[in-house]
Image (spheres, helix red, strand yellow):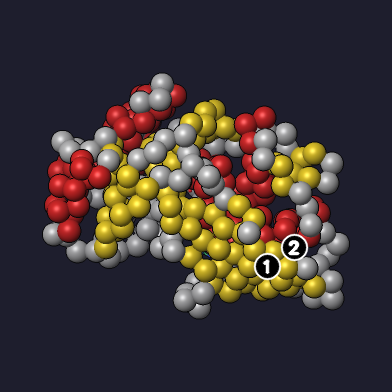
Amino acid sequence: MNGVATAPGASTILNALATGQGSAFAIDVETTATVKLAADADAVTGEITDATDADTRLIERCVERVVDRFGNGEGGVVTTDSEVPMAAGLKSSSAAANATVLATLDALGVTVVSDDDTDTAAVGDAITKLGACRIGVEAARDVGVTITGAFDDASASMLGGVVVTDNTADELLAHEPREWDVLVWTPPERAYSADADVDRCENVAKMADLVAELALDGRFGEAMTVNGLAYVAALDFDTDPTVEAMPHCHGVSLSGTGPSVVAVGDETSLAPVSELWAERDGTLIETTTRTTGASIQ
Ligand SMILES: Nc1ncnc2c1ncn2[C@@H]1O[C@H](COP(=O)(O)OP(=O)(O)OP(=O)(O)O)[C@@H](O)[C@H]1O
Ligand SMILES: O=C(O)C1=C[C@@H](O)[C@@H](O)[C@H](O)C1
């Protein structure tokens, strides 16, 4: 009973910490999960390739939740192998959870239905992609790696494209395809979402409402830039990387609770941003949006 699945990381248009409404888009860097289940194994053990000291509770809990719902008490081993850096703002936990849930469903032979936008929670012995996504969100809540549940990040990773969500109800408000070039700058420091200063974020709630309006109007570039300016201030990051990118790109924002800053546009508009950000410490990733989301391999 083996299963393998991949899920992409994501970046932020609207951070949900202020109001519970969020918006995110999938990017073309991904995490692969491999799940090996056995009827006679009595526990689930997680391993994260190249990060032996990292916390494996999220992926173990994802397997347990899928087995509780669709299995028969199986245990086993889950391994993730990821291109998405942890605690960088690029939704590594959502990618790991989605890949693990899908790989476990694959191992158990459960059919995953792709009628994402109709959002039927489960159809007989099958489950929709959004239903699978909600299992990962619940697992993230169980182990405390999220503030709101991060259904925005998780559904962007699961479905691909751009989503707008209500994280207080785990509901999808909009789902749109967008094709942008994407430039990611990740400074050397790391920031775990669960440690973010939520009280400071609540101070920018009126700006978050404006960002949600822009996003629901399909004005994603402006939405993410307003979000970026509000949240770099609220979370006390340097405003310079955002401001210097603004004249060139379609949109730029702090991603999640940082520290990465992400700009979207086309190759020509991102070239001067790349030159400016290359002078800073840290790493640059040139990628694209991804419209296809997570999948069983
Ligand atoms: N590749 C992975 N494999 C297994 N577990 C992971 C992986 N990435 C993240 N996690 C789990 O999620 C926890 C939170 O990670 P992290 O802060 O990176 O997630 P995040 O909330 O998605 O934030 P960010 O958007 O900053 O990446 C980690 O401590 C770990 O338990
Ligand atoms: O932990 C959370 O609930 C969140 C973390 C960040 O990624 C945010 O971008 C997201 O909107 C919500």
Quarter of the rendering containing residue 7: bottom right
Q: Nearer the viewer, residue 8 or 54?
A: 8
- The structure residue drawn at horizontal position 48% and vertical position 58%, both measured from the top left corner, is 30
- The structure residue drawn at horizontal position 49% and vertical position 53%, both measured from the top left corner, is 8
Residue of label 2? 107
The first of marks 1 and 2 along the sequence is 1
Q: Nearer the viewer, residue 55 or 224?
A: 224
Residue of label 1? 35
Q: Is mark 1 within 8 Å of ligand 1?
A: no
In the rendered view, tell whether residue 77 sits above or below residue 232. Answer: below
Residue flagged by tag 1: what amino acid is it? Val
- The structure residue drawn at horizontal position 63% and vertical position 67%, both measured from the top left corner, is 34
Residue flagged by tag 2: what amino acid is it? Ala
Q: Nearer the viewer, residue 18 or 187?
A: 187
Judge from the rendering whether residue 167 lies leftward or rightward of residue 234; answer left or right.
Answer: right
Residue 134 horizontal/vertical position (percent): 64, 45
Q: Is mark 2 within 8 Å of ligand 1?
A: no
Quarter of the image that includes the N terminus: bottom right
Residue 206 horizontal/vertical position (percent): 35, 26
Mark 2 element type: helix
Judge from the rendering whether residue 159 lies leftward or rightward of residue 222; answer left or right.
Answer: right
Mark 1 element type: strand
